[in-house]
Image: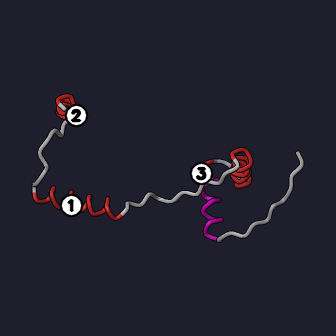
Amino acid sequence: MKSAVINIKTDPKLKKDIKRVAVELGLPVGTIINAMMRDLVRERRVVFSAPPALNRRTQRLLQSIDRDIKAGKNADGPFSPEGAVAYLKRL
């Protein structure tokens, strides 16, 4: 198989981290990058992901729920799996 060389610039920490992960997976870095490039060609898309972030409304709702729980409000209901199923069947 012929091969071509691609030179890229990347953050030194990222390079160190990918080498560490590659070793943990037992794969060469080149194999991982080739797999990613094959996915790009096959799928014709690049997926960028970030940790999900809650919107302000959801954050306020969760804060309100936490306050209610600490105050002992709105905390009655089925908390066992069986109680939850029975509750849902009554709805």
| Discs 3/1, front | 1
Mark closest to the chain's N terminus, 2 or 1: 1
Mark closest to the chain's N terminus, 3 or 1: 3
Give residue 91's position: percent from left, percent from top.
19, 32
Label 1: element kind: helix
Camera-nearest residue between 55 and 28: 55
Q: Main secondary structure of the magenta part?
A: helix
Mark 3 sits on what residue?
Answer: 24
The amino acid at mark 2 is: Pro
Q: Residues within 10 Å of mark 3 (few under 14, many from 20)?
A: few
The amino acid at mark 3 is: Glu
Instruction: Look at the picture and state if 89 lies above or below 5.
Output: above
Q: CA distance from mark 3 to mark 1?
A: 42 Å
- For the residues labelled 3 and 1, say whether their Cβ atoms are less than 8 Å apart: no
Mark closest to the chain's N terminus, 3 or 2: 3
Residue 81: mark in rendering: 2
Q: CA distance from mark 2 to mark 1?
A: 25 Å
Label 3: element kind: helix
Label 2: element kind: helix
Mark 1 sits on what residue?
Answer: 64
Tell me if residue 46 is in the magenta stretch. Answer: no
State which quadrant residue 42 falls in: top right
Q: Residues within 10 Å of mark 2 (few under 14, many from 20)?
A: few
| Discs 2/1, front | 1
Instruction: Look at the picture and state if 80 lies above or below 17.
Output: above
The amino acid at mark 1 is: Ser
Identity of the residue drawn at 37% across and 62% down: 55
Q: Which residues are magenta?
A: 12-22
| Discs 3/2, front | 2
